[in-house]
Image: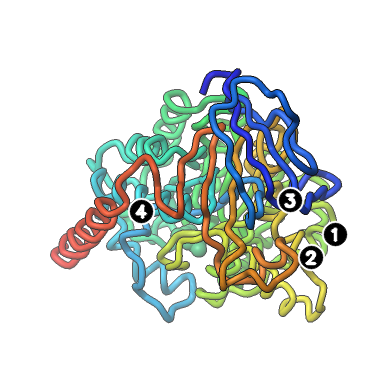
């Protein structure tokens, strides 16, 4: 949209998620080009020029677009398998299938994962992709293409594994890359796809998978590579008691100390899960501003435990929310994670207000932007920020009797998305994706899931 073309949204509740948690019961927003030009209480100012569209958003809450901070898109075509396993057993059951993915499968799975999230209010997504079978094609390119087509802002965390069974790791030997191959391919992906500019639609992070699937050398050199290139670092950390035991046996220390010893704490790092953290681990994350991708549904599905999010927030740790891969969170939705984060953390802390609705919304918006390093641009509704926002319909049977819109959004049923914008461009209307064919994606994900199951069964 040209910079002088304006969209006016009026008559809505607004939760800005700015530093003061400013909210308007009945307000307006003016979008100009790709930015939020102004917002406030009451009607938009009279006499605005070049208004190309006026949206009467009566009955809606407008929030910043949701930001997903941890996912594995390829798992969209292996949902519903190994349903009663803990993390290590689940991984061992699924690695042989995952090691057979190819470019067509990865593209379809990325379309499915992105489509499901975008329909539910996600405007910024990430994919931690760490399985690169030999001869499987341009997997990273196919994932980035799917993100561009869907219209969401995107971070590809180029993952890798090089510690297989023969080196004491968990993955089978045929599922991993070499140290040199993983580093070279990661660097090439950064060079080809990373955009460091304000408002970038595609960024790349360096993302070796986890302590039990990655050599210490790949952790160290991966961190050096990321810092040389000025990109962020991502990995799984402290997810289960088994991982903690693994680290103590192999490295003689717990996961957080191991990460610190390999250069993996810092304000350019975010880690998924962080369930098994003691006080000194949380203090180390807070001191270094290392971010956390909290994935409550996946942690429950894999019986991993409950991350100490209220303690992390109190200590000043940046925390966002993650769907996680859909082989461990079949719903694939982020808006339900707002509710699950609130409920699960109250259970974990045994405290009624351990996390409230506004904190949950902040985790899914500004917190996510912080951990992805995008907080100057997105995550809150403020003049000058990019126009990434969602109109949630709260005036139907599901929500109309709840007076407070943020409570309705977080604690109520999953709210319908009337419209969702990225850079001021609409990508969702009435819960349907505008730029891609949802029904065609449903068919191709079904077909690719079946093809993968067939190939894996024959291997
Ligand atoms: N929840 C998940 N944890 C993981 N650890 C690891 O090494 N891979 C995974 C994964 O796919 N999901």
Q: Which residue in the rendered view is the most extreme toward the front?
A: 46
Assess disc 2: are there few (<14), some (14-19) or many (≥20) residues with their C-alpha within 10 Å of its C-alpha.
Answer: many
382 shown above or below 16 = above
Could you tell me which secondary element the residue under label 4 belongs to? helix
- Residue located at (36% from left, 45% from top): 177
Q: Which residue is mark 4?
A: 112
Q: Residue furthest left?
A: 458
Name the N-terminal-most of marks 4 and 1. Answer: 4
Give whichever of discs 3 and 2 has the lower sequence position: 3
Between disc 3 and disc 2, the foreground one is 3
Per the image, label 1 sits on a secondary structure element best described as: helix
Q: Are marks 2 and 1 in contact (CB under 8 Å)?
A: yes
Which residue occupies the foreground of this view, 414 or 53? Answer: 53
Q: How far apart, in angstroms, are the residues tagged by discs 2 and 1? A: 6 Å
Q: Which residue is mark 3?
A: 15
Give the numbered dot on residue 310.
2
The answer to whether residue 258 is seen in the rendering is no
**Quadrant location, the C terminus:** bottom left
Q: Position of residue 132 (x, y in %)?
A: 33, 46
Dot 3, crowdedness within 10 Å: few (<14), some or many (≥20)?
Answer: many
Give yes or no for contact between labels 4 and 2 (Cβ–Cβ under 8 Å): no
What mark, if any, has residue 314 been given in the picture?
Answer: 1
> Between tags 4 and 1, which lies in front?
4
Relative image position of residue 5 (x, y in whole percent): 57, 22
Quadrant of the rendered image containing residue 452: bottom left
Determine the secondary structure under disc 2: helix
**Residue displayed at 35% across by 53% down:** 112
Instruction: Give the alpha-carbon distance from disc 3 to disc 2, as whole Å.
Output: 21 Å
Mark nearer the N terminus (4 vs 3): 3
Do the residues bearing badges 4 and 3 touch, measured as CB atoms within 8 Å? no
């Amino acid at each position: 949209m040209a910079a002088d073309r304006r969209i006016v949204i009026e008559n809505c509740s607004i939760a800005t998620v700015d530093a003061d948690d400013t909210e308007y019961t009945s307000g307006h927003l003016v979008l100009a080009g790709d930015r939020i030009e102004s917002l406030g209480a009451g009607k938009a100012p009279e006499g605005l020029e070049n208004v190309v569209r006026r949206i009467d958003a009566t009955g809606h809450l407008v929030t910043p677009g949701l930001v997903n901070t941890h996912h594995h898109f390829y798992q969209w075509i292996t949902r519903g398998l190994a349903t009663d396993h803990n993390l290590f057993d689940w991984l061992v059951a699924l690695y042989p299938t995952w090691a057979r993915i190819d470019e067509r499968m990865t593209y379809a799975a990325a379309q499915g994962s992105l489509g499901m999230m975008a329909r539910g209010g996600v405007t910024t997504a990430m994919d931690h992709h760490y399985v690169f079978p030999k001869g499987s094609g341009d997997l990273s390119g196919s994932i980035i293409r799917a993100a561009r087509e869907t219209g969401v802002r995107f971070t590809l965390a180029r993952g890798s594994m090089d510690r297989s069974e023969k080196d004491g790791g968990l993955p089978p030997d045929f599922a991993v890359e070499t140290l040199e191959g993983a580093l070279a391919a990661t660097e090439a992906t950064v060079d080809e796809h990373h955009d460091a500019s304000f408002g970038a639609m595609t960024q790349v992070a360096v993302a070796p998978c986890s302590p039990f699937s990655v050599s210490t050398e790949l952790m160290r050199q991966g961190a050096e590579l990321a810092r040389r290139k000025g990109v962020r670092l991502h990995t799984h950390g402290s997810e289960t008691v088994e991982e903690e035991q693994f680290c103590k046996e192999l490295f003689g220390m717990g996961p957080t100390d191991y990460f610190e010893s390999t250069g993996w704490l810092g304000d350019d790092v975010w880690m998924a899960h962080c369930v098994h953290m003691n006080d000194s681990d949380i203090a180390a994350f807070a001191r270094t501003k290392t971010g956390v991708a909290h994935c409550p549904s996946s942690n429950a599905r894999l019986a991993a435990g409950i991350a100490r999010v209220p303690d992390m927030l109190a200590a000043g740790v940046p925390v966002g929310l993650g769907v996680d891969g859909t082989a461990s969170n079949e719903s694939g939705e982020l808006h339900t994670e707002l509710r699950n984060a609130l409920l699960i953390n109250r259970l974990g802390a045994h405290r009624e207000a351990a996390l409230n609705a506004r904190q949950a919304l902040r985790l899914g918006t500004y917190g996510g932007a912080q951990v992805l390093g995008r907080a100057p641009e997105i995550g809150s509704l403020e003049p000058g920020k990019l126009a990434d926002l969602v109109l949630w319909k709260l005036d139907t049977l599901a929500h109309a009797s709840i007076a407070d819109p943020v409570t309705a959004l977080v604690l109520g049923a999953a709210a319908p998305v009337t419209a969702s914008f990225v850079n001021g461009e609409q990508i969702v209307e009435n819960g349907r994706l505008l730029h891609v064919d949802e029904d065609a994606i449903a068919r191709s994900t079904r077909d690719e899931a079946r093809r993968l199951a067939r190939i894996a069964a024959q291997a």
